[in-house]
């Protein structure tokens, strides 16, 4: 892949902000260079020093866990940050386009809209599978990024691996992003394994779902080191705060706990599916490799409002492409799912 062709010229030549910690990154010394408070934080914690701008300690540990190199890792304030930065780095406003496969995660379009980057749609099939004809129709010479969400949000299913590989092979000079926010819940390998095979591949993961750390805001992009360098150049200098970095280091020692939580959620998912299927007004539950169920009801909007009145909040997807009469339900605890089912069992109309 020719990254010099891919990246916007002014980003290639951009002179980035050089922070105090860029200019001296050693950990020993008398630090009088960053205008920090030398005593302590008013909050009582040790937050008076700026964090490592490149989160090296965290990346080394995450790299071991994921079987990649630290140089393949970009950490962002949620996955939303790398989504935004990729578009900023690669797409020319009003010229370039991105290809999305609706129904899909909403942020690809929002970030493109903010930058005035055009959208080409390649809808999934009725069964929420990649439609390669739609993809090949949608891609043109102005296409810079193709977004694949697998397992897909809001449908919850994994997308066909061989179709994704075909897309990666067909467009070696375009970026193909595989958003794996829900991959921990799926019984399959991550596309991280394909990183050595495709320079145009970007894999997105997040600590917001299976790892249970949504409030900390930590998303990860794995890709070619050249592209990582570009993302580093345009990010805010200290984008991951010290607290988040410390908490992440702790969490990375406890992968088993994450796996146990995933196993528990998957059991609860199967039970909730069985229970929902017994309801007379449930029409269809789509296959899920994630921690959500997309459910088609006879009158989804009325059910959504009924649940809301009982303070049970699910996601109304009825206005989303291919999701007529569908609600998206996150898998809760045993008690939460029970509350949902008790409400639904009393629904009459
Ligand atoms: C939840 C989600 C994300 C993660 O967002 P964060 O900003 O990391 O919390 C990314 N992609 C998809 C498809 C999601 O559903």
Image (spheres, grey):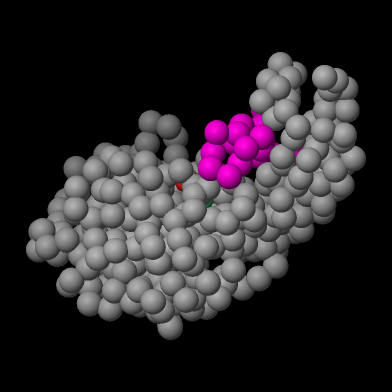
Tell whether 338 sits left or right of 78: right
The relative height of residue 55 versus residue 273 in the rendered view (above or below) is: below
Tell whether 121 sits left or right of 20: right
Task: Identify which residue is drawn at 24% across, 43% down.
Answer: 116
Tell whether 286 sits left or right of 277: left
**Quarter holding the N terminus?**
bottom left
Q: Which of the 4 image quarters holds residue 46?
A: top left
Q: Which region is colored magenta?
A: 311-333
**Quarter holding the C terminus?**
top right
Q: Position of residue 197 (x, y in %)?
A: 43, 83
Q: Which of 210 and 178 is in front in this view?
A: 178
Residue 290 in view in this figure: yes
The relative height of residue 165 versus residue 257 in the rendered view (above or below) is: below
For the stretch drawn in magenta, the main secondary structure is: loop
Q: Nearer the viewer, residue 195 or 207?
A: 195
Q: Position of residue 135 (x, y in %)?
A: 43, 63
Q: Where is residue 259 in the image (x, y as percent from the top left)?
A: 70, 61
The relative height of residue 250 versus residue 114 in the rendered view (above or below) is: below
Task: Identify which residue is drawn at 52% across, 63% down.
Answer: 131
Task: Identify which residue is drawn at 26% across, 48% down.
Answer: 117
Does residue 316 show up magenta in the picture? yes
Residue 342 in view in this figure: no
Does residue 325 show up magenta in the picture? yes
Q: Nearer the viewer, residue 180 or 130?
A: 130
Residue at the extreme bottom of the image, as rendered = 197
Q: Where is residue 156 in the image (x, y as percent from the top left)?
A: 64, 52
The number of callouts visible is: 0
Tell whether 191 sits left or right of 46: right
Q: Which of 152 and 192 is in front in this view?
A: 152
């Amino acid at each position: 892949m020719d990254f010099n062709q891919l990246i916007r010229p002014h980003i290639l030549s951009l002179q980035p902000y050089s922070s105090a910690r860029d200019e001296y990154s050693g950990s020993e010394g008398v630090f009088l260079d960053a205008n920090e408070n030398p005593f302590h934080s008013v909050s009582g914690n040790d937050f008076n020093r700026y964090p490592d701008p490149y989160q090296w300690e965290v990346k080394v540990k995450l790299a071991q866990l994921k079987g990649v190199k630290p140089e393949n890792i970009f950490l962002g304030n949620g996955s939303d940050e790398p989504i935004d930065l990729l578009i900023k780095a690669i797409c020319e406003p009003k010229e370039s386009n991105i290809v999305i496969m609706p129904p899909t995660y909403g942020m690809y379009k929002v970030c493109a809209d903010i930058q005035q980057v055009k959208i080409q749609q390649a809808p999934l099939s009725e069964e929420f599978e990649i439609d390669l004809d739609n993809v090949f129709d949608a891609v043109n010479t102005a296409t810079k990024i193709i977004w694949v969400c697998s397992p897909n949000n809001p449908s919850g299913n994994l997308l066909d691996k061989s179709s994704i590989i075909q897309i990666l092979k067909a467009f070696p000079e375009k970026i193909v992003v595989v958003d794996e926010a829900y991959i921990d819940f799926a019984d399959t390998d991550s596309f991280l394994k394909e990183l050595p095979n495709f320079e145009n591949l970007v894999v997105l993961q997040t600590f917001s779902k299976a790892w249970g750390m949504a409030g900390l805001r930590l998303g990860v992009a794995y890709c070619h080191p050249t592209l990582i360098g570009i993302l580093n150049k345009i990010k805010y200098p200290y984008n991951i705060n010290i607290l988040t970095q410390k908490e992440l280091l702790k969490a990375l020692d406890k992968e088993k706990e994450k796996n146990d939580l995933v196993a528990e959620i998957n059991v609860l998912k199967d039970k909730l599916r069985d229970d929902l299927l017994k309801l007379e007004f449930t029409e269809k539950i789509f296959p899920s490799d994630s921690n959500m169920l997309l459910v088609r009801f006879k009158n989804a909007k009325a059910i959504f409002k009924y649940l809301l009145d009982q303070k049970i909040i699910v996601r109304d997807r009825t206005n989303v492409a291919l999701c007529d009469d569908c609600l998206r339900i996150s898998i809760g605890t045993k008690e939460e799912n029970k509350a949902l089912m008790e409400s639904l069992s009393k629904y009459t109309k």
